[in-house]
Image (spheres, coloured by chain):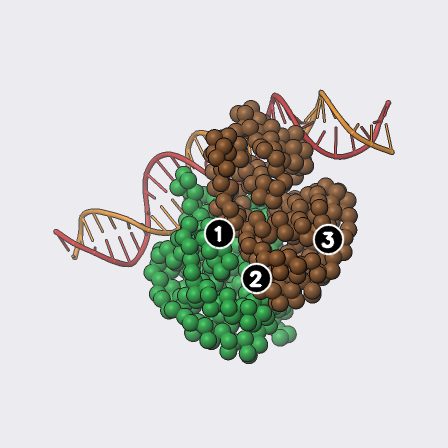
Chain colours: A green, B brown, C red, D orange
Amino acid sequence: MTAIEALRRKLESIGELSESVVRALETLPLRLVRAERGEEVAADGAVSTACCLLIDGYMHRQKILREGGRQILAFHFAGDIPDLQSLHLHRMDHSLIATTACQVAFIPHDPLRQLTHNQPLLGDLLWRDSLIDAAIFRTWIAMMGRQSAVCHLAHTLCELFVRMAAVGLAQDNACRLPLTQEQLADALGLSIVHTNRSLQELRDSGLIRFDGRRLVILDWAGLRHLGQFDPTYLHLRRRPRFDPCNPIARGRS
Amino acid sequence: MTAIEALRRKLESIGELSESVVRALETLPLRLVRAERGEEVAADGAVSTACCLLIDGYMHRQKILREGGRQILAFHFAGDIPDLQSLHLHRMDHSLIATTACQVAFIPHDPLRQLTHNQPLLGDLLWRDSLIDAAIFRTWIAMMGRQSAVCHLAHTLCELFVRMAAVGLAQDNACRLPLTQEQLADALGLSIVHTNRSLQELRDSGLIRFDGRRLVILDWAGLRHLGQFDPTYLHLRRRPRFDPCNPIARGRS
DNA sequence: CGATACGTTGACGGAAATCAACCCCGGTGG
DNA sequence: CCACCGGGGTTGATTTCCGTCAACGTATCG
């Protein structure tokens, strides 16, 4: 998949994209780079001059705290621009890490900003994307502050699955999800041990299957209910019309 | 203070604002409204057609969860546009509440969006503002996930104080902060009881004085250290040059 | 004067952290 | 070929931070 094709899928999942805008996107200068697993693509505190468009692979954003603790802030995959905020906040306030080996395209800030000025509708759409990023943070805050570990975990898995499905990265009721339990724990704000036990709870209840590489949803309604998951906050253009794993609703497409 | 004057102070605290842009802002149609304490200015799930510029008073944003729990997501004061995200995310994914009686100005979306198109530099600055909003969410996530109650509380107080100081709402080492312990607790994701005890800890250590109306910082260095507070993530135009309560640094202005 | 909202305190219970093993598996190198 | 190693996952025992419950104090207000 090309860089612009990945971006196009993403933007179309959250808004309308005209042909002229797509053509304009294709004029952007791109620097294609491969990032190795664990590589720090953008460092906390650094000043950045380009945004990173993720074409293939997985990345995450994280903050390292004084006593060595780590908090993961977001997970990203093909089509995402994990450091879009750097377009107007030049200094990074967290770092961007390649969760797996990745293919990325760097888009220099200057031409990208120019393009958002010349094509206000594209600018609005990218702005919208960054606002959805923020909406996800808000939801994480609510889950961390007021929900139990299992609920939070279930919610997070729902969110990742729906986001991936929206850009065509899920087949049927499964998606690739190459996360260690340690990464999951650092995203949820839990210990590894407790994360492990919460995962077991979801598995033992027959809601999911997950081996650190692939997530299979066995009972979407159950997982969604347990995680109190309501996809409104993702602001997708089409709300998922049916529960991905509900064969009845799926029948009438 | 007028609506545009409040907005001007805010925008100047995070970026450059040219005279022509200020004049352009003054052409915006405003609907001035008073909101009473506790009033829901924008409801979760509602579709909004205007942004709310806060001229005087305090507001907060919150999510209500299924079992009646509440999570406060942000605190706002004069100059803030708490629902700026609605400009590109029409449906609210949380609600906006008047913490105290407020004076607000509603700015309809259409002319505001037009203005961001005609004045790309203003658009960029508002975008930046919404990105700082997100940066604050990220920091809250890290605090909730990986820090103790007192640390989180100290950090939150530091943040509020610095944000207010940046727009001239703090005098010396004190600012108005009309929050109940229940609201503080719902922001921190703690119980009221534990919030009360954490506050006492800060008071007993001689770091702050706080009576639910006014926050006085008695030991900025200590509070800042305890809360692991580093203001970088607020992306202010001028980093606070001196610690507000450090008389030595303050001497050489 | 109650009524209500907010703050404070003590006793108790529970969810999650911490500590400490142990297992499995793939890679690597003697 | 097998010993060794490191990363990741799993389990049990113990501890602790924080939540819950319940009561009481205080101030404001109609």
**x then y, percent, for residue A156:** 53, 54
Look at the image and tell me whether residue A214 can be seen. no
- Nearer-the-camera pick, A139 or B199: B199
B47 w.r.t. B55: above or below: below
Q: Which residue is mark 3?
A: B105
Q: Which mark is residue B121?
A: 2
Q: Secondary structure at mark 3?
A: strand
Q: How far is the residue under mark 3 from the one under mark 1?
A: 33 Å
Decide which of A127, B220 is in the foreground and name it: B220
Camera-nearest label, 2 or 1: 2
Which chain does the numbered disc 3 sit on? B
Reading the image, the residue beneath label 1 is A73
What chain is tagged by disc 2?
Answer: B
Secondary structure beneath dot 1 equals strand
Residue C8, above or below A101: above
Verify CB contact (< 8 Å) between mark 2 and mark 3. Answer: no
Q: Secondary structure at mark 2?
A: helix
- Is residue B159 something that shows in the picture? yes
Which numbered tag is attached to residue A221?
none
- Mark 2 and mark 1: span between their CA atoms? 29 Å
